[in-house]
Amino acid sequence: MKKITLFATLLLMGLSLQSTARNGYKIHLKIPDVKDSMVFLAHYYGKPLPTIYKRDSARFDKNGNAEFFTTDSSFVGGIYMMLLSDKKTYFEFLLNSNDDMTITASVSKLPEGVKFKNSPENERFQGYVDFLKVYSKGQEALKDELAAAKSVEDTAAVRKKAGKTAKDLTNYRHDYVAKFPGTLLANIFNALEVPQIPEGDHFLEDGKTKDSTFAYKYYKAHFWDGFNYQDDRLIHTPILDAKLEEYMNKLVLPWPDSVEHESDVLLKKAHGTKDLYKYTLWWLTRNVENSKVMGMDEAFVYLVENYYMKGEAFWLSNEELTKYQDRAMKIAPNVIGNVAPEVKLPNVLTKKEESMQAIKSPYTLLVFYSPDCGHCQHEIPALDTVYETSLKAKGVKVMTVATEGDQKKIADFLIKHKLEKWTNTWDNEHVGDWRGKYDVYSTPTIYLMDDKKIIRGKRLDHTNILSVIEMQERKARDKAKNSKK
């Protein structure tokens, strides 16, 4: 990185001056023992290796020289790599906009022996790499000592040493940040910072009861303190993806409203950036869309309605954006907590019209299945077993919708498995819109409604229906208790 100038100092103070410096970078790479082959300038994008992206390429001449040059105003710095033509040999370095540097190396020594000219920050980065080598050797030695420990005292002594060396690493980073604030490496160190829980006992407001959740609350509240969500260079490091994974999937409660709130908070932090905002919104959307937690599709609909449909997914084409919108529109009617859409279809056996909303029961199961579906042939009989052993006693009633098959095949399936006690329907005229209302893209698909036909569970199976009902009953009891207080 260039030396701190008066101009840079004024920028750090928030003053606005017109810069005459060019954008982009200029890199002269010299590796004498590589000739007449390609070399690639690659970078991270949110994730660690092996996922890397190529930004630029050059060819070594007969003397092992290669040039990289751009004045692209969209260039964003970060941790970059020189990747040789074998796609395996590489070394990392720091790159900022306006950098003009010379890098010298020997392929036989890589990743050792890399030298930089006109890049003080990379010289400091190499110093940190050297520190890490010594630190890693010390860690390995401590592992050996721990394995050889023969008493509690020996183990405690090793752990005490480990604590001291961990502080040495933390102090190294803190000292660097203090000396070179705002630089790329300083912001990387800050982003890697882990919240340190204050020692001692912590109490609730009464001053007497110990707060057993203090450590969790403190760690969560300070998790993003060091991550500068306004520094787009951090997208070209392997840090963000791991932090999002830990925070959203380990610290945030797996409830749609909690996920929606935390998503808003993170996207507000990233607002105004390009790649950090893009990656965060993409990650959050993919995370809830692929979640195995029941009801998390509500958060997917929330993100689409509040961000994608409001122009925030600026990188998507109209066609790609339409796919998100269509998916959200299919999910929105059957989100948990909504009143279930009506289903009116003829009974397979009696041919009279049946109405799902007309079924009177504490709970109603709506089951979409196909008699030809292999999974259904296992799941439906298993569901009947659970129904007979526990669900019927709780007043559960079942309405089935055969998604395909002729009347005889469906009737034979129902009779074979002794399911005539249920309300069994089919869409023989193919006029029902149940597929769109309930987002039925595979079978079996099972929904659970309460006495008011509010959706309480979706995409269930015979193993978890009873637990969802029991959870609803616990909520009702707790609500009744609280109302009496």
Image (tube, rainbow, N blue to C red):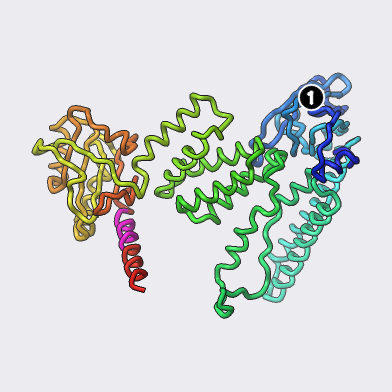
Q: Is residue 28 visible?
A: yes
Q: Is residue 189 left or right of residue 292?
A: right
The residue positioned 73% from the left and 34% from the top of the image is 76
Q: Which residues are magenta?
A: 465-473
Amino acid beneath label 1: Thr
Q: Nearer the viewer, residue 158 or 128?
A: 128
View extreme (bottom): residue:
208
The residue positioned 60% from the left and 38% from the top of the image is 279
Magenta-colored stretch includes residue 376: no
Q: Is residue 5 left or right of residue 320?
A: right
| Label 1 secondary element | loop
The residue positioned 60% from the left and 66% from the top of the image is 215
Quarter of the picture holding the N terminus: top right
Q: Quadrant of residue 270?
A: top right
The residue positioned 74% from the left and 72% from the top of the image is 157
Label 1 crowd (10 A; few <14 / some 14-19 / many >=20): few
Q: Position of residue 283 (x, y in %)?
A: 56, 41
Q: Is residue 31 left or right of residue 51?
A: right
**Residue receiving disc 1:** 71
Quarter of the picture holding the C terminus: bottom left
Q: Position of residue 116 (x, y in %)?
A: 88, 36
Q: Is residue 442 left or right of residue 419?
A: right
Q: Position of residue 255 (x, y in %)?
A: 45, 53
Q: Quadrant of residue 478?
A: bottom left
Q: Is residue 29 visible?
A: no
View extreme (left): residue:
350
Q: Main secondary structure of the magenta part?
A: helix
